[in-house]
Amino acid sequence: MTALDSLAVSDLPEERKETLPRPSQQLKSLNQVHEVNRLNELHQVTDMAAPAYGLLGAIQ
């Protein structure tokens, strides 16, 4: 990943290198979006199961 980051800015002037997001930063952001999506999917499943859990608690 470090090599890819270096290649991404190798042809840029020094003053521009700091303003360009590195591929590693972009992948981290993409991974965070993926994690949020997974949590949302889990939340949807637990929301659907919540009424059933309430029913089971009443039976016990």
Image: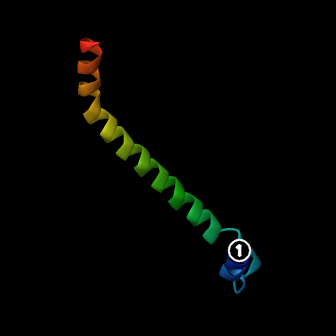
Left or right, 25 with respect to 56, comes to right
Helix, strand or loop at mark 1: helix
User: From this viewpoint, which residue is outermost toward the front?
Assistant: 60
The image quadrant where one finds the C terminus is top left
- Image position of 50 with respect to 36: above or below: above
- Dot 1 surroundings within 10 Å: few (below 14), some, or many (20 or more)? some
- The residue at which mark 1 appears reads as 17
Give how far across and how far down residue 1 sits, in percent.
69, 72
Find residue 13 and report its image quarter.
bottom right
Q: Amino acid at mark 1?
A: Lys
User: From this viewpoint, which residue is outermost toward the bottom?
Assistant: 11
Give how far across and how far down residue 24 sits, in percent.
64, 67
Give how far across and how far down residue 38 sits, in percent.
42, 49
Give how far across and how far down residue 12 sits, in percent.
69, 83
Residue nearest the viewer, comparing 36 with 60: 60
- Image position of 18 with respect to 32: above or below: below
Q: Residue at x 52, y 53 (%)?
A: 32
- Image position of 48 with respect to 12: above or below: above
Do we see residue 52 in this rendering? yes
Q: Residue at x 48, y 51 (%)?
A: 35
